[in-house]
Image (cartoon, rainbow, N blue to C red):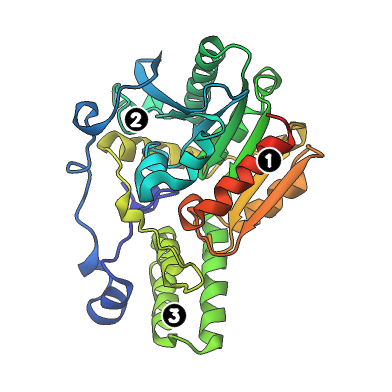
Amino acid sequence: MKTVLKNQFRFRPFFCSLVLCALLTGITSCKKDDPVEKNEVKVSEFTPNATFVVKNAEESMPVWVNGNKNANAIILVMHGGPGSDVLDFRAYKDGLAFKKIEANYLVAYWQQRASGQSTGPDISKYYTIDQYVDDADKVIEELVKTYPGKKIVLFAHSWGGMLSSSYLKDEKRRNKIAAWIDAAGAHNGTSLLKTTTDDVNAEVDSRIAAGKNTEVWKEIKKVVKEQPEKINSIAYLVTAEIPEVVIKVDNADFKMSSRGHSSNSYLFKEIIKRDNNPFLADVKMPCLVLWGKYDFAVSRTYQKEFLKNIGSKDVTNVDFNASGHYMMFHEPDLFAKSILDFMSKHKL
């Protein structure tokens, strides 16, 4: 399996330290040990009981619903990866942003197929975008049944942008959703690697021209040229070196199970062939778009594409000027406020 396929969207850094690896010992000597086995998650160890479990196509997927039971809406979280753990949103850095949102709304944390505590066979036929769309529909049906009368709002981050935009292609499914929150969503996989490479090179050139830490930035530029297949791992390291991003997020902190890695490798081959831009015009619901200024993993090119192609006349766009790919951790207060203001504006 090629690393470039294994690590898209939710990549693990290839370096122990940018300076130590890039300047002193080289790239391969600081590659992380394979974390698959030691990061395998077991429900009984530390995870609270799920609110309910959705079973579909040989998979059992837990959903945790937390927050204000008197709210009129439920925010359904479509996490990234593919293969990441949805509970990271509540656990990492104390989950400050989402816990603020929970004070006002219900938030449904759906553990996708092959992620975290979900259980099922490791079979490639189930690792398709269409299968995950069907899984999402089953989750939404259960939410509607369990919480009658409450509106459903989609929150999608990273790979979740591909999943949510694929879900919303169908009119019947769109009619189940009241609003869409897109946080650095990769709705177009066909240019993912190119846009990341272009953005990284542009940022590196800008930093070199500014004359600060030039040796580090020159070394990054060299690595990009010599090892282009590692561009997405490099993208996170570039964000980490930017002083304007005050709160640092180490992508290696996030767990991924062995099935998470497996699903990621199969899905990525499909992701890079899919462009959902042509279908965005059919989306008329209120939309909130959230993006980090220094997000090189999912390019701000996609933010511009979304704003250009979306059919909705009611779109709120928020830029996070001190964030990379994980704006909910980089700037939790602004993240929570942006969502709460959007929900309030639309009486959700």
**Residue 253 x, y percent position in the rendering:** 30, 52
Q: Which residue is mark 3?
A: 217
Q: Position of residue 60 (x, y in %)?
A: 35, 18
The reply to whether the C-beta atoms of the residues labelled 1 and 2 are less than 8 Å apart is no
User: Mark 2 or mark 3: which comes first in sequence?
Assistant: 2
Question: Is residue 218 rendered to the left or right of residue 47?
Answer: right
The residue drawn where x is 67% and y is 31% is 179
The amino acid on which the numbered mark 3 sits, given as a three-letter code, is Trp
Mark-to-mark CA distance, 1 and 3? 38 Å
**First in residue order: circle 1 vs circle 2:** 2
Secondary structure found at label 3: helix
Q: Amino acid at mark 2?
A: Ala
Q: Which residue is mark 2?
A: 114
Q: Earlier in the sequence, mark 1 or mark 3?
A: 3
Where residue 53 appears, as percent x and y from the top left, is 38, 17
Residue at far right of view:
313
Look at mark 1 in the image and give the residue it sits on. Answer: 342
Does residue 190 appear left or right of residue 16 in this picture?
right
What is the secondary structure assignment of the residue under circle 2?
A: loop
Left/right of residue 46 with respect to residue 261 in the rendered view: left
Q: Is residue 290 visible?
A: yes
Report the residue at 48% width, 58% height from top.
330
Mark whose residue sits in front, 1 or 2: 1
Nearest to the observer: residue 124 or residue 241: 241
Foreground: 222 or 324? 324
As shown in the figure, which amino acid type bears the numbered disc 1? Phe
Q: Quadrant of residue 156?
A: top right
